[in-house]
Image: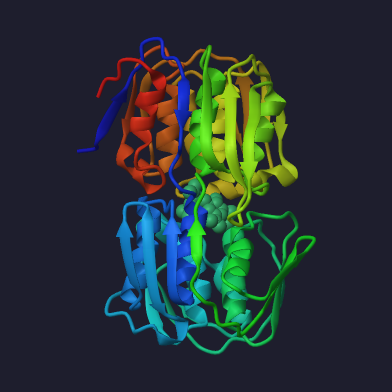
Amino acid sequence: MTELKTVKFDKPVIKGSIKVPGDKSISHRAIMLGSIAEGRTSIKGFLDGEDCLRTVDIFKQLGVTIERMGTNVVIDSPGLRNWRQPAVDLYAGNSGTTARLMLGILSASEIESVLTGDDSLSKRPMKRVTGPLELMGASIKGGDLLPLTITGGKLQSIEYDMPVESAQVKSAILFAGLNAEGDTTVTETTISRDHTERMLKQFGADISQQGTSSTIRGGSVLTGTDVTVPGDISSAAFFMVAAAIVEGGTCDFIDVGLNPTRTGIIEVLRQMGAQVELLEQTDEVGEPYGRIRVSHSSIHGIEIGGDIIPTLIDELPVIALLATQAKGKTIIKDAAELRVKETDRIAAVTTELTKLGARIEATEDGMIIEGPTPLTGGTLKSYGDHRLGMMAAIASLVSEGAIHIEDPSCIAISYPNFFEHLEELALTTYEE
Ligand SMILES: O=C(O)C1=C[C@@H](OP(=O)(O)O)[C@@H](O)[C@H](O)C1
Ligand SMILES: C=C(OP(=O)(O)O)C(=O)O
């Protein structure tokens, strides 16, 4: 039977402050680089969500020692050249980041392995990564979809112009380039999240950036270091939207990541008329982070497209919900990538919000939303997609009736304590 969670609030007020869990993208990369490097890496603020745990399990299979005490992680690695042959297939679960970045790492290792994933991940395109890796000389068998068999070996550098906007593709090539012969350059049309570049520098790699190009010199041996992971702005986005749409809402986000390649949600909230204040900022750990406050105010529709899309790609489901409460039309475009995420997020968001009475239409590369519309209650599917599950829960803050979320456990993929934070912030009776 499908698990169902009922969420209903009686006149909710969003008030308070939260520290969201660690950034998913940065947590994956910290485990990966700590395992590629020789020696000890200590991570603070690690996200113990399902996706990042899949990355941890894979490196344990490769003989890396990883001790986890909640959000503190200590890695002791013999370095990429001394990994051991895994006894089982390497399972990436639901995590696109794990699968795609591992393809780049394993291609340049001395390991032969089979990479697998769950049903959702086994439908997501891998050619975007295996294509450029094959140009570098990688041996990957199995076609466009998982499972794939990777025989690690010597790679040559390339200069690669990216045909898709994807930090996962860029990162896979940079990881392969780290262990290839010569200088590898990846060029994007719009800059996508740059956590890989920042962290490679922290671990001592020879990497430089010019415009939208990143160049890495092959052959550096990395040494372990300390990494602090800031809060995940993609997780905070759900409560940022909650604070913006609930009458009287105001919420502080403590130690949340503010890397400019990820802050599109702040720009969108401001453009729509919500109040977003930056209260503190620092970037002493290689990644900017700080404290921000989001408060309710009347909001209006806008057009969201072009260069801003990669900086808020995972926030678009909850931005669509935000737009249902904004006056006028919101157009989301240039976001066809949403169709190849954990589920087709354009189809799923449109179907689910329509069930609540939203006026929302799917386009090939986005959505058009007319607001404001009152939302009714209803039963919403998560499609096993954490972002859809959390969007449904946030909708309950403004819906007239209860929201029943089908298969809510997927939320633990990126935000294990999401419902505790929701309950804490809504300051009201919370029904299980
Ligand atoms: O590199 C990363 O950590 C990620 C990149 C994005 O995917 P794409 O590279 O497919 O755009 C994003 O949607 C994903 O949640 C995490
Ligand atoms: C798309 C996402 O992740 P991934 O690609 O790593 O599965 C996400 O977290 O929204």
Q: Is residue 189 above or below residue 91?
A: above
Rendered location of residue 416, percent (x, y): 35, 42
The answer, for residue 171, to whether it is visible in the render is yes
Q: Is residue 265 above or below residue 101?
A: above
The structure residue drawn at horizontal position 30% and vertical position 41%, both measured from the top left corner, is 409
The answer, for residue 142, to whether it is visible in the render is no
Q: How many marks?
A: 0
Q: Is residue 334 above or below residue 249?
A: below
Q: Quadrant of the C terminus?
A: top left
Q: Quadrant of the N terminus?
A: top left
283, 238: nearer the viewer:
283
Question: Does residue 308 appear left or right of residue 382 in this picture?
Answer: right
102, 400: nearer the viewer:
102
Rendered location of residue 257, percent (x, y): 57, 45
Residue that lies at the very extreme toward the left in this rendered image: 1
285, 90: nearer the viewer:
285
Rendered location of residue 243, percent (x, y): 53, 22
Question: Does residue 391 appear left or right of residue 330 in this picture?
Answer: left
Rendered location of residue 128, percent (x, y): 59, 66
The structure residue drawn at horizontal position 48% and vertical position 40%, both measured from the top left corner, is 235
261, 154: nearer the viewer:
261
Ligand 1's quadrant is bottom right
